[in-house]
Image (cartoon, rainbow, N blue to C red):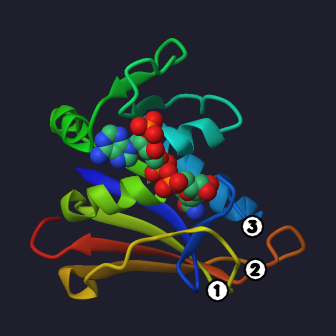
């Protein structure tokens, strides 16, 4: 199965200045738990925004650059199609962003894990609009707001109709 995982503000924003905007430890935990042990597929800009290689996950990075210097263990792909084909042999893989890569993979994902952050933010990249009719909401869990997680949020799973 190919899934994507993303945290999206109420106005669609997902990032600013090549980084995340909000601090929501509950979502980081959800991301860690969900993607643990799996391949994570990302654009070159998202890869460069990571503070370090995420443990216990194989990083696949998409770039047009022939000279991209990747750390050992990181697999490079020259197009989303190439990564998509390689992912066909896996039980599970996660597209983890950013905006360009979500847009290119949206037609191909079977499932989307969307953390809805119920507040508007100022940003420079957004999650692409998608046909809600193509998906069925199969799980919704409200996040717990506390002193460390100050924004209301919920974890929503969308499964592509007729696929899962
Ligand atoms: N809220 C969230 O859950 C979340 C998750 C992930 C990222 N983000 C945010 O999203 C932002 C980054 O997103 P972004 O859209 O700017 O960049 P991105 O999608 O991470 O990466 C874009 C890069 O991917 C490569 N690429 C894209 N399409 C390609 C194609 N068809 N063929 C070959 N290579 C291709 C290109 O690399 P080259 O230029 O090297 O060719 C392009 O510059 C950051 O602010 C980040 O924090 C948010």
Q: Earlier in the sequence, mark 1 or mark 3?
A: 3
Q: Is residue 164 left or right of residue 78?
A: left
Asked whether disc 2 touches disc 1, contact meaning CB atoms under 8 Å apart, the reply is yes
Residue at image coords 58%, 67%: 14
Look at the numbered disc 1 and give the secondary structure of its residue.
Answer: loop
Cα gap from disc 1 to disc 3, whole angstroms: 11 Å
Report the mark closest to the observer, 2 or 3.
3
Q: Crowding near pointer 1: few (<14 within 10 Å), some, many (20+)?
A: some
Q: Position of residue 41 (x, y in %)?
A: 39, 41
| Along the viewing direction, whichever of 142 and 5 lies nearer the viewer | 5
Q: Which of marks 2 and 3 is nearer the N terminus?
A: 3
From this viewpoint, is residue 38 visible?
A: no
From this viewpoint, is residue 49 visible?
A: yes
Placement of 117 over or under 107, stated as above or below: below
Placement of 144 over or under 10, stated as above or below: above
Asked whether disc 2 touches disc 3, contact meaning CB atoms under 8 Å apart, the reply is yes
């Amino acid at each position: 199965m190919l899934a994507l995982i993303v945290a999206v503000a109420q106005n669609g924003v997902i990032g600013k200045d090549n980084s995340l905007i909000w601090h929501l430890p509950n979502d980081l935990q959800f991301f860690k738990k969900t993607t643990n042990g799996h391949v994570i597929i990302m654009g070159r800009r998202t890869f460069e925004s990571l503070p370090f290689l995420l443990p216990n996950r194989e990083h696949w990075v998409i770039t047009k650059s022939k000279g991209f210097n990747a750390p050992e263990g990181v697999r490079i792909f020259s197009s989303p199609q190439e990564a998509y084909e390689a992912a066909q042999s896996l039980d599970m893989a996660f597209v983890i962003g950013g905006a360009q890569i979500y847009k290119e993979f949206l037609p191909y994902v079977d499932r989307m894990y969307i953390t809805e952050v119920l507040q508007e933010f100022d940003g420079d990249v957004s999650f692409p609009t998608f046909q809600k009719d193509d998906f069925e909401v199969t799980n919704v869990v409200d996040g717990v707001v506390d002193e460390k997680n100050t924004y209301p949020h919920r974890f929503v799973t969308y499964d592509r109709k007729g696929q899962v």
